[in-house]
Image: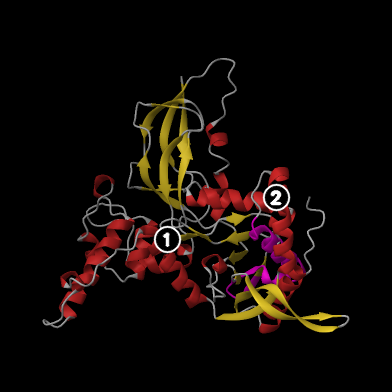
Amino acid sequence: MGNIKIVLPAMGEGIFEATITQWLVEEGSKIEEDDSMVEIATDKVDSEIPSPATGILEKILVPAGEIAKIGQEIAILKVEVSANDNVKSTSELALDLDAAVQEPAIESISTVDELVQASIPFKLDNGLFLSPLVRSIAYKEKLSVNDLANIQGTGLGGRITKEDVLNHLHKASQATESVSKPATMVTDSGNPNVSIVEMDRMRKLIADHMVKSVQTSPHVTSFHEVDVTSIVNWRNKNKEKFQSIYGQKLTYTPIFIDAVVKAIKKFPMINVSVDGTKILVKKNVNIGMATALPDGNLIVPVIHNADSLSISGLASKVNDLANRSRNKQLQATEIQGGTFTVTNVGSFGNLSGTPIINQPEVAILALGAIIKRPAVIETEHGDTIGIRHQMILSLSYDHRVVDGSLGGMFIKQVADNLEAFKGENIM
């Protein structure tokens, strides 16, 4: 028998820790290779970690409810080892985590770490250790050491977790509101005509992300109407043939994403992010596709290196990511690294919208509903009126680095690409 140390794997740029939400296998139980052994949650996505080998879960090192760092050992797996087995070392099974372990413990916290340390120590007087995340929240919310000492920790050995601090802040906020309300005011809980629905974890994350985006980027939105009649006609004619050849349902989304990718190639300064006064131009074209979930929430899986895919390849990626998004089967890396996002507001019948930028990107394109309209058609014999399939594109962009000229030229290029679509060399 031999032991494998299970570590928390790297989960993409900007993720340095995760909460262990649930162990799916008890200590002493057998687990097969690739079976899910633990559920984890980050501020980006919920995910599962598969077992690297078949064996017995010998020891759980980080219990449910606790926070673990990337590269930290969270469990020990006992496996059968024979003389002929080529057993991987712990470092190999750790998925090349050495570099990740050397990164700062919390994204962006290192830039204010000295300020945090000045007001929030690593340990309280009672000896309890405070994680960098807890210290960061306490610093930002102006909690004192005494405030923290009065929080009842629910973590291992009474340790204060992120949830403990957030619950404390929530209760403090409620207490403040109740004191400030006039005695005659009826609270929501006492009003039979009002029901209170607490935000779930994902909705809270979405809310925070949207507020942060608006606070970070001065948003400008440009609109462009596009004639997609040729796309509609081609799809109606070829969707069954496409599915028989590629085994994929053909929606409009891969065609639209292909047009976006080609426009990004022509205007690469739309495929950037901002770091202070620096503009980071991304060589990879990674397209995020906003996906509505059955519970009403939203997630943005990413098609990495979308510029290397054909429309059939994009169709496969779009269908796979959309399906696994709705079934909560995405891996953390599949919602990381996006450089540009597309959202289809037309799927709900909306003509257009003003989407909020998905940070740290600098632009997002909304696709409106495809509507039949009478339109002027220019012909060699003069203008005429015809029935056309039209839609409105709306591009929101970060005015810090994207001016109206670039935003306008980019959205027009997307429209030109769509109107020039012929469906050649696809089947």
Please say if the residues under marks 2 and 1 sit with CB atoms less than 8 Å apart. no
Q: Is residue 399 left or right of residue 329?
A: right
* Residue appearing at x 37%, y 33% in the figure: 25
* Residue appearing at x 73%, y 48% in the figure: 241
Write down the quadrant of residue 24 in the picture: top left
Label 2 – label 1 distance at C-alpha: 28 Å
Is residue 269 located in the magenta-colored stretch of the structure? yes
Crowding at mark 2 (Cα within 10 Å: few <14, some 14-19, many 20+): some
SS at mark 2 in the image = helix
Position of residue 172 measured from the top left corner of the image (x, y, whole percent): 22, 69
SS at mark 1 in the image = loop
* Residue appearing at x 65%, y 47% in the figure: 248
Is residue 48 located in the magenta-colored stretch of the structure? no
Which one is in front, 65 or 275? Answer: 65
In the displayed structure, would residue 423 be above or below residue 327? Answer: below
Which one is in front, 365 or 81? Answer: 365
State the mark number for residue 313.
Answer: 2
Position of residue 65 measured from the top left corner of the image (x, y, whole percent): 32, 47
**Magenta span:** 251-279
Please indicate, yes or no, whether residue 41 appears anywhere in the rendered image: yes
Position of residue 409 measured from the top left corner of the image (x, y, whole percent): 73, 78
Amino acid at the residue labelled 1: Gly
